[in-house]
Amino acid sequence: MRYKSCHLIEHGISLDVDCIKACCLSREFDKGQLMIEPKYEKGVIDWDDIFNIKKKHRNYQQNQGDLSACEGCYNLREEDWDEEDYISFINFDHWSQCNSDCIYCGVRQNKPKTKNNILNAVKDLIKKSKFRNNGEITFQGGEPTILPEFEKLLTLFINEGSKVRVHSSGILFSRAIRNGLKKGAVTVVVSPDSATKDVYKQIKRVDKSKEVWQTISHYRRNLKSEYQNLVKVKYIIIPGVNDNLVEINEFFEKLKKIDIKSLIVDVEYTYANRNMGNISSHVYMLIDYMEHFAKQNGIEFDLYDSAKYARQNRTVPQTTNMDSNEFISDFNRIQWENMKQNINY
Ligand code: SF4
Ligand code: SF4
């Protein structure tokens, strides 16, 4: 039947620390169709119950209930959705512990500490033949590599033929991630947001820059050419902290040295949220500069959500002169102006 919905409402779950939702994007789960289990404890999941609730949500979508919780979301679309009961998208967000302490982290402030074991519930889903590997598994967290079950959980999905995306601090090396990269099953995203030890420490509040770059380098080593872009290195632009050309140029040198083939750029989300529609030209120039670098060096370039939304609301023109002295002088002038509106971390 044709109606407005999304792949996550139909066949996805997002496991939070104390509840199960359809996705992790909307902030308005109280509106009805996106909350699956408001109370979720100790990693026990009744899959029959989940599918019953999903059926109700499907009816809700078919009858065109209030879809305002999904308003503006790029995943919402009209399509001929199938009506079978299975899960093919799982987002693991069910713990908040981490070995980093990023200044911009929203996870540790907003989530209680838990130790939900989830492996048996996932095995149960597979045993019931209600898991299909045609979607995507994501690990957000917290830091996945410190979860005692992580290596087994990831290996389980790799063996199921799933595609998995893992967001990791990179402080610990994971054999399961490395194994998944070699098979082309895992994408790993590590976000050092810096190149130098001091700026890393200022952002992450732990002294692990060396370990993180070592991990990235180990993940990248000896991958087949078609899998080389599965190691993604991210730079979150944090106004007043790492938004300068010295740090970014050093970051580029590291990418070139390790031969990284995929770069993701984002803008620190509290800054982006507070300044949407009024993002500094300086930030746009940095995004342009990083995209230019990626193009020049044959590196895949992508933006994460805050940077994507910032680009959609862009009011300043694209920077075109970045190889010239003019760019540097423009940059310095705008950087100085920007310093006045920085937020304090
Ligand atoms: S349409 Fe967007 S906000 Fe709504 S459930 Fe899907 S991903 Fe979440
Ligand atoms: S790595 Fe992620 S979860 Fe850990 S402190 Fe940083 S932002 Fe938070």
Image: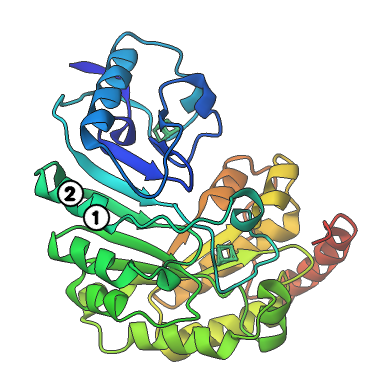
Tell me the number on the disc at residue 247: none
Q: Residue 88: x and y, percent?
A: 22, 44
Q: Is residue 130 left or right of residue 74?
A: left
Nearer to the camera, 231 or 16: 16
Query: Is residue 295 in sight in this rendering?
Result: no
Residue at position x 40%, y 49% in the image: 42
Q: Quadrant of residue 282?
A: bottom right
Tell me the number on the disc at residue 120: 1
Q: Residue 181: x and y, percent?
A: 26, 75
Residue at position x 64%, y 59% in the image: 105
Nearer to the camera, 144 or 42: 42
In the rendered structure, are the residues bearing label 2 and label 1 in contact, judged by CB atoms less than 8 Å apart? yes
Placement of 92 over or under 178, stated as above or below? above
Tell me the number on the disc at residue 124: 2
Placement of 32 over or under 198, stated as above or below? above
SS label for mark 1: helix
Q: Is residue 255 left or right of residue 245?
A: left
